[in-house]
Each structure stands twice: as structure tokens, then as C-alpha cells.
Amino acid sequence: MSDLVLVINAGSSSLKYSLVDAASGDAMATGLVERIGESGSSQLHHGPNGEFHGDEPIATHEEALRTAIDAFATYGPSLGGTDLAAVGHRVVHGGARFSTPTLVDDALVAEVGELIPLAPLHNPANLEGIEVARRLFPDVPHVAVFDTAFHQTLPPYAYTYAAPFEWSRDHGIRRYGFHGTSHSFVSRLVAQMLGRHPGEVNLIVLHLGNGCSATAVRGGRSVDTSMGLTPLEGLVMGTRSGDIDPAIHGHLARELGWSIDEIDRVLNSESGLKGLTGDNDFREVLRRRDAGDVRAQLGFEVYCYRIRKYIGAYYAVLGTVDAVVFTAGVGQHSAEVRAASLQGLESLGISIDAGRNSEASGTGGVVSADDSRVAVLVVATNEEWEIARQALQIVRA
């Protein structure tokens, strides 16, 4: 049987896809369709027979996926001649119901639909991608892989908010966490790099991209994570505020007359590094910081300080830490962030080697000093491979 899995990540106006060999992690082809249903649609496909760039209008996700299938046929590999083992779908929110990847059927579609209030920006798009793919690939098993699933091992005292008990019981208001496929992949990979079984290793994993999250992993299981009911909580991100005083909502409503929707939009889309500096591209923030820009310097310091606070908190949660791990775009590529985030933690046994840290940007590896009790590693995450791997496990179970 083939090990090939078509991985689909459907956003509200985008469709990202990869054809992945789940055994090796090799991506046979990748693609992205953007601005679906908007002006200026674009299509990009990388295949073994070349690369396709298109700018034809794309009205729906079904049209986007048909465009992708056509690109596979021309630029390879043709899905018509490929024995797909499964189609793996990224689904952002699985609530408390889904702790493992799950075969897609009508009942699952209905249950994910019921979770839309917990992820109104993401789950509808994820569901649309599932429905379209089921129509176009009716004879292939489809598997939903949930961003929240890896964090379903959090103990109740870690996922429960100190709010009226009925909020959690009746409305599902609790910490769920996100970036689960990334944290799962990275945790397993780092255990291998350390030559140990995942069940023997305690890690603090820092997924730092435009979205950012920290996770405390004890013995291969998530025991705390920085994102909460939504991806807004926790670390400073590209456009998201991360942790703030919840009373700010009421203050803005009273003082400025803002609606809850407007406050929510600003905290999700106009805050974080963008709110602090005017830029959510970390490369531009670093360029401006190096040029002496005061706002960029403050943004950098706030960003790294928040990371350092979470490292300290999760060190206390775990008791002992085998490694601190940096991954995703900023985590993998910014030696400055890694150095600043770990500054002053030598008393916790965490210290990095400046030369190794500089050389590791973009390539990965161990960046801790020889006398550091806690290893510090830089690794590349691969969420598509993790989705493909989990999907294949389900269809072969």
C-alpha cells in the first residue's frame, strides 16, 4: 500500500496542500491558492516536473482544489495515477471531544460544526476543505488531525480558568492550546536527537512564528501550553497581543465606545509586534532595531521578555528540564531572539554558545554551551509530515 498522503490546510480564503510520503516525510509536491473568492487570486504549485504560477480568479475552495489537481496532472505527480493512502485535513479546534486523529464521516463533520463557536474564523474553512475534498476524492479515506489534540493531556488544574464553573461545564470555556501538530512533531524529534525515548524527556518547546506558543512537555505529553480557549492567549505574536489584563476589554468599551467585535479584531489583527512597532515581519523589526529604532527595540524586548517568563514558569511546572527547543520561522532563524530569551537563565542551568547559536540559524542543531545542564536545540518543524504520519496511522490501524 502507498504511504502517500495528500495534506490539506483550508483557510477562510486560502488552500495550502502537500503530497507527503508519510514514511520519509518527503514532500512530493506542494502548493498554495490564495485570495479565494477575492480579487487578485493566485496559485502556486511546486512539482517534480516544474513550477506553476497562476493568477486566474478562483471563486470557491472547490475551484481551488480542482486547480490544484490540474497542476498535479501537469507538473506532477498526477493524482490520477497515484495510490493515495489518505487525505489528511488540518482542523484547528477539536474542543474536548477529539484527542486523536479521527476518520472523517458525516458524524465527525457535524461534531466539528458544533465546535464553530470555539473557532469561528477557522473551523468553518476547515470544514469546507473537508467537504470539497470528500467530493473530489470519494474513494480515499479522509482523516481530521486537530491542532488541539496534543494538548488534551493537560490536567484539569492546568486547563481550567478561575471563572464561574458553569462557563466550563456549559460552554466549554477552558484552555485548549494550539500548534499541537508542531509540538507533537518537535517533541518526538528532539527525543530522538537526545538518544532517548519520548517518555523519558521533559521539554519546553517554543513555536515562534507569526503565531507563537510555548508548551511544557513531560514524558512526551503536553502538561501546559500558552494558548488558551483561542490562539490569542500567551506569547507576543506577529499581530496577536498574547496575555493582557482581561479588564482592558471593558475599559475600551467604556472609554472609546468600542464593540466587543472591534476589540477582538484589534487584539487579534492589530496588536503584538504590529501594534508595538508597526511591523509584524520579524525581519523588518530586527532591521529597524539594528538601525536604532526605539519602537522596534521595545517590541523586541517585550517579545523576548514574555518568552523568558514562560520558560521560567514551565521550568517550575516540569521540575526538571532536559531541553529548551526553538522552532518555526522566528525560532529557527533568529539567533538574536534565542539569545535574548535565554539571557539570565544560567542559574537554571540554561546557557547557550554564541558561536553555535549564530551558526544554527536556519540549519538547526544544538546551540547550548558545553557546561549547560539543559540542552538548547533549534529544529525545523514539519506539520505537514506530522499530519500525514497521523493520518496514515489511523487508516492502517
Image (cartoon, rainbow, N blue to C red):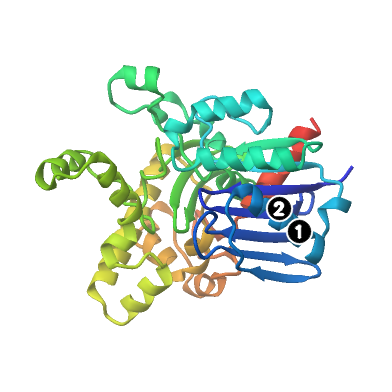
Give SS at disc 1. Answer: helix
Quadrant position of the N terminus in the picture: top right
- Kindly report the distance in space between the C-alpha atoms of the residues bearing marks 2 and 1: 6 Å
**Viewer-proximal residue among 99 and 380:** 99
The numbered dot on residue 70 is: 1
**Viewer-proximal residue among 50 and 220:** 50
Q: Which residue is mark 2?
A: 66
**Circle 1 residues within 10 Å: few <14, some 14–19, many ≥20:** some
Single out the residue that lies furthest toward the left. Answer: 255
At horizontal 58% and vertical 28% (from top left) the residue drawn is 98
Q: Is residue 270 left or right of residue 348?
A: left
Residue type at mark 1: give it. Asp
Vertical order, 167 against 284 (above or below): above
Q: Are marks 2 and 1 in contact (CB under 8 Å)?
A: yes
Whether residue 349 can be seen here = yes
At horizontal 30% and vertical 56% (from top left) the residue drawn is 271
At horizontal 72% and vertical 39% (from top left) the residue drawn is 135
Vertical order, 121 against 287 (above or below): above
Vertical order, 298 against 210 (above or below): below
